[in-house]
Image (cartoon, rainbow, N blue to C red):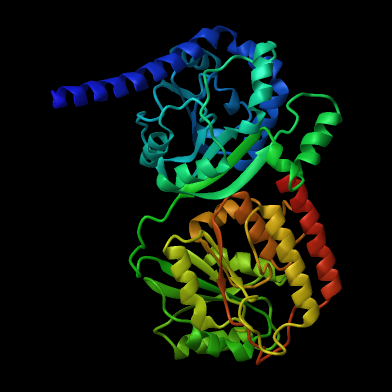
Amino acid sequence: MTITNENQTDNWALEHIRSRKQYVRDSYASIASVREKWILRNRYFYNRLGAFLKFIIEPGSSAVLFRSELGQLFEKLELSRAVGVDICEKMVEQARLKRPDAEFHCADPEEVSLKGEFDHVIFYSLGDIIDIEKAFLNTRGFAGSSTRLIVINYNYLWRPLIYLAEKAGLKVPQPTQNWLNIPVLENLLHISGFEVVKKYYQVLFPFNIPLVSWFINGVVAKLPVVKKLCFLQILVARKAIEAAPEAKKFKVSVIIPCKNEKGNVEPAVVRVPEMGLGTEIIFCDDKSTDGTADEVRRVMAKYPHRDIKLVNGPGVCKASNVWTGFDAATGDILMILDADLTVIPEELPYFYGAIAGGAGEFVNGTRMVYPMQKEAMRALNIIGNKFFSWTFSYLLGQNLTDTLCGTKVIWKKDWPRIRKLLGSWAINDRWGDYELIFGAAKLHLKIVEVPVHYLERTYGETKMTKRFQNGLIMLRMCFAALKKFKFV
């Protein structure tokens, strides 16, 4: 008798789930014939959401969209492969007719099986998904280490207004929604094996009134407290670290940009450790006049067991010199080490561990943790660096304590994507630090920092002169980033 009761309980639970799914399907089937009319009526809202997704999703990438409806969110995206998944057969039939260039499936997000990996997995709405955790877990089958999971949630604070809008005929009726907020979503992502990279808040005023809508959504909605009231809450996540990879799995390229650094060439070779499968040291000589290039050739002959290369830089600026080294590198991981050796080369394995172990995808060195040697950085530089670090943290939504540390580490596979964004920040970044940070943030790479010890230069002279002029350039880049990241 006990077994029968348990079976009856199990059957009741399963039946409850099935009936809930059928209720959601029936709800969407009942509005399928008028869905396009409602989308057109709220074109302003969908245009803003589509434009924002275009900001996140790179042209030419692939994406799968859950709760795809008529595929309206594909409209502004330039995708190499677009796949929509919806539970309503009538919606899917209409979507196939409207967008023959996309692929549509009628299936539950918890159980759908898709071939290949996607660059982006988008959940347009979680409000009526029966088992959100199972849906997140299911996406791991077609999400790789570089895939970004984009979760679009409707702010539950708007529920009373949504209810009134539905009753007044201003909004299409929807099935009873799940009660979700950002902490709940972050927890669901965490237990499903995902890590939130960034959070966005969009659309404070979902109606189109010329100038008024622009001001409210483009300015007021970006204010620190007000943004939490926005209608849309958008989370970008990546697969969390599953297990630390083997210590010797990746080849490393250490890029050393140098101009008149002859005395630091041999110490760099001696002090840069061997990492991973092997360490390639690339000296990028930026038309030195002190014999730096000849010194590199001498050191190459003296240390034949080290993988040392000499690349001729363009003689324009440090940034262009570094890009030349990146293009010439053959390693899986790219590291920048300034030739002045003020950042200790012996600490590079910490950066290798952070990126190879999966803790981050863009590793930034920070000199603002450990005490510096007395003359390593002037007081004005420290003040300026802290100001710009605070500004960047606000602009990018990821914490940074030192934007100008020369030691930065990325994956070689991400370099072509960042390269496409060079020069798109309204000003020429002669040092390259901001180009890399902005690019990493734009691509939603996971940014982490590694503390380094910062010492005085022992040979040559600093190239960081004209501090006020450089400060103005950095400030102009911040305004450009403000427009790119906050007013989207």
The residue most toward the front is 1
Q: Where is residue 204 in the image (x, y as percent from the top left)?
A: 73, 33
- Residue drawn where x is 41% and y is 68% of the image: 251
Q: In this view, does 438 lie above or below 378?
A: above
- Residue drawn where x is 62% and y is 72% of the image: 366
Task: Find residue 205 and report its image quarter.
Answer: top right
Q: In which quarter of the image is the C terminus?
A: top right
**Front in this rendered view, residue 6 or 427:** 6
Q: In which quarter of the image is the N terminus?
A: top left
**From the viewer's perspective, is 369 left or right of 465?**
left
Q: Where is residue 411 in the image (x, y as percent from the top left)?
A: 50, 60
Q: Is residue 115 visible?
A: yes
Q: Is residue 487 visible?
A: no
**Front in this rendered view, residue 432 or 17:** 17
**Front in this rendered view, residue 307 or 209:** 209
Q: In this view, does 301 lie above or below 431?
A: below
Task: Find residue 369 and report its image quarter.
Answer: bottom right
**From the viewer's perspective, is 248 left or right of 354?**
left
Q: Where is residue 484 in the image (x, y as percent from the top left)?
A: 73, 47
- Residue drawn where x is 71% and y is 65% of the image: 389
Q: Position of residue 469 (x, y in %)?
A: 85, 70
**From the viewer's perspective, is 176 left or right of 224?**
left
Q: In this view, does 126 lie above or below 99?
A: below
Count of numbered circles on the image: 0
